[in-house]
């Protein structure tokens, strides 16, 4: 079943984000244990839904980020999405209102 999934398309105002990987080695070459590595609060937008619906006319309200944007994420929240068990990518679905900032 997982091989059949080619692409995830978020619904409404949801955004699919890949969290950036935490640095496990310092510039000096010291390897850090997993417990001392903090949670990474940055990610890259992989896919964006069409936006939430306008209550008056039913049209979509556009989302403020697009694919490829770097965003600042909350420490907690989001729904973890498992696409392939082979890949180590951490993908999360967030609502647009959960995204803290767009990084440039």
Image: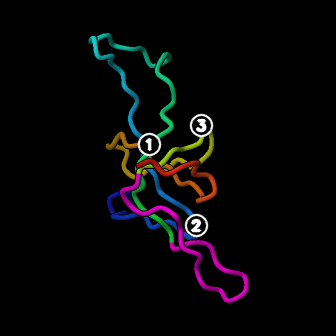
For disc 3, the neighbor class at 10 Å (few under 14, some 14 to 19, many from 20) is few
In the image as oriented, which residue stretches furthest toward the right?
Answer: 56
For disc 2, the neighbor class at 10 Å (few under 14, some 14 to 19, many from 20) is many
* Residue at image coords 39%, 14%: 32
**Where residue 102 is drawn, which disc sits there?**
none
26 in relation to 50, above or below:
above
Q: Secondary structure at mark 2?
A: loop
Asked where in the image residue 27 lies, by quadrant, the reply is top left
**Where residue 13 is drawn, which disc sits there?**
2
29 in relation to 92, above or below:
above
Q: Secondary structure at mark 1?
A: strand
| Residue matched to label 3 | 75
* Residue at image coords 62%, 73%: 52
Q: Earlier in the sequence, mark 2 or mark 1?
A: 2
Q: Secondary structure at mark 3?
A: loop
Image coordinates of residue 56 in percent, x first then y, are: 72, 86
Quadrant of the snapshot with the N terminus: bottom left
Q: Earlier in the sequence, mark 3 or mark 2?
A: 2
Image coordinates of residue 73 in percent, x first then y, are: 54, 44
Looking at the rendering, the stretch of residues picked out in magenta corresponds to: 50-69
9 in relation to 85, above or below:
below
Give the left or right position of residue 39, taking residue 24 as reference.
Answer: right
* Residue at image coords 56%, 72%: 51
| Residue matched to label 1 | 19
User: Quick one: 96 or 3, which is closer to the camera?
Assistant: 96
The answer for how far apart the CA atoms under marks 3 and 2 are is: 20 Å
The answer for how far apart the CA atoms under marks 2 and 1 are is: 19 Å
Question: Magenta segment, principal secondary structure?
Answer: loop
Residue 102 among magenta residues: no
């Amino acid at each position: 079943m997982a091989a059949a999934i080619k692409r995830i398309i978020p619904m409404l105002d949801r955004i699919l984000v890949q969290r950036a990987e935490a640095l496990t080695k310092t510039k000096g070459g010291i390897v850090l244990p997993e417990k001392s590595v903090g949670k990474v609060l940055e990610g890259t937008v992989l896919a964006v839904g069409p936006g939430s619906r306008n209550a008056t006319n039913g049209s979509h309200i556009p989302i403020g980020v697009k694919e490829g944007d770097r965003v600042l994420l909350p420490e907690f929240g989001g729904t973890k999405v498992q696409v392939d068990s082979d890949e180590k990518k951490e993908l999360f679905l967030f609502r647009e209102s959960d995204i803290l900032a767009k990084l440039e």
